[in-house]
Image (tube, rainbow, N blue to C red):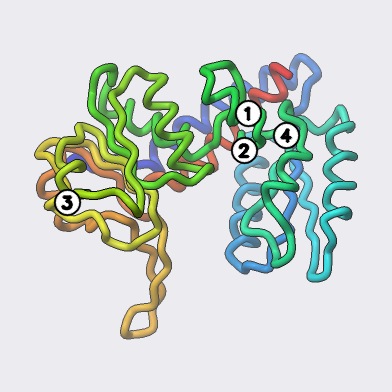
Amino acid sequence: MAKIINGKKIATEFCDSVRDRVSELKMRGISPRIALINASNDPASEIYVSKKEALAASVGIESDIYKFTKGTKEADIIELIEKLNNDEKVHAILLQSPLMEGLRFRELINHISPNKDVDGLTSVNQGRLFSGEPGLVPCTPLGVLHLIHSVHEKIAGLHAVVIGRSSIVGRPMTLLLLNANCTVTALHSYSRNLEEVCKTADILVSATGHPKIVGKNFIKPGATVIDVGITRVIEADGTRKIIGDVDFDEVSEIAGAITPVPNGVGPMTVAYLMYNTLKLACCY
C-alpha cells in the first residue's frame, strides 16, 4: 500500500516557517502585502480568493481584494494593475482565473510587473524559468516539487512524467523537474502510448482535469504519484465531491507514494502563494 503524502499537514508546517520569516521581516519595518484581483463570475473563485485572504492573515501577510463585476472592461483592470505596480506598499499581485467572458488572461497578466507577479505567469517570468534564470515560479509546480522532495531527498536522474502542458502547471512543472536534473517526458492529449510511457516513470505528475484518467495500468510499482487534477462531480444522491486525475483506490495499491484529492496538492499551492509573496517583499 502506498504512503499517503499529506499535503495539508506539509503545507501547515511550511506556513509555520513562512509566518516566522514574515515576523522577522516586520521587525525590519517591511510588511508583506498582496493584492488579490477577482474579475471572475465563477462562484468557486470567490471561495478561492477568500481562502487566500484568510491564509495571508494567518501568516501575517496583509491583503486587499479588488472585485470586478459583469461589464468590466480590460482597461479598468489594466488601470488598477498599473496603480498597484507603482504602489510601494504592495509587493505581490495576483489575477484570479478564470476571468469573465470577454477578458483575456494573457493580455492582462502581462501588465503585472514581473517583480510583483506572485503567480509567476507573466511571459517574463516564464521565460526566466525556461532559461534557468532566477524569477518567480508558478505556485502549484513549486508545491508539487516540495511534495516530491518529501518522498525523495534526491531526484536527479529519476524519470519524471508530466501529463498536461498548461502554462500554469504542466509546462513549468516540466521545466522545474528538468532544472532539478530529472529525465522528463511531457505527455498531453495528442500523445501516443500513454499507459506504456507512464509505466516507466519513477515520478508521475498528472494535471489534466480528467477524472480518474490514471489507473493502475499507468503505474510502475513503487512510483511516486502526484495528482494535481481537480474535478467537481455530483453523486447520484446529490452530494458534491472533488476527485482527481488518478483513480486513488487502484493506484494506491501499486504506487510507492501518492497524494490524495483533496488535501494533496491544493494546500501546497496556497502555501507557496504566501511564500512567493514573502520572497517578493524580501528581494524585489
Q: Are marks 2 and 3 in contact (CB under 8 Å)?
A: no
Q: In this orientation, which residue lies closer to the viewer: 131 or 259?
A: 131
Q: Which residue type does callout 4 highlight?
A: Ala
Image coordinates of residue 28 in percent, x first then y, are 76, 14
**Residue at coordinates 38% horizontally, 83% vertically from top-left?**
238
Foreground: disc 3 or disc 1: 1
SS assignment at label 3: helix
SS assignment at label 4: strand
Q: Are marks 4 and 1 in contact (CB under 8 Å)?
A: no
- Say which quadrant the N terminus sits in: top left
Residue with the mark numbered 4: 92
Foreground: disc 2 or disc 3: 2
Say which label, 3 or 4, has the lower sequence index: 4
Q: Are marks 1 and 2 in contact (CB under 8 Å)?
A: yes
Foreground: disc 4 or disc 1: 1
Asked if residue 82 can be seen in this view, the reply is: yes
Tell me the tag on residue 125.
1
* Left or right, 73 with reference to 283: right
Q: In this orientation, which residue lies closer to the viewer: 89 or 22?
A: 89
Cα gap from disc 2 to disc 4, whole angstroms:
12 Å
Picture quarter containing residue 7? Answer: top left
Residue with the mark numbered 2: 121
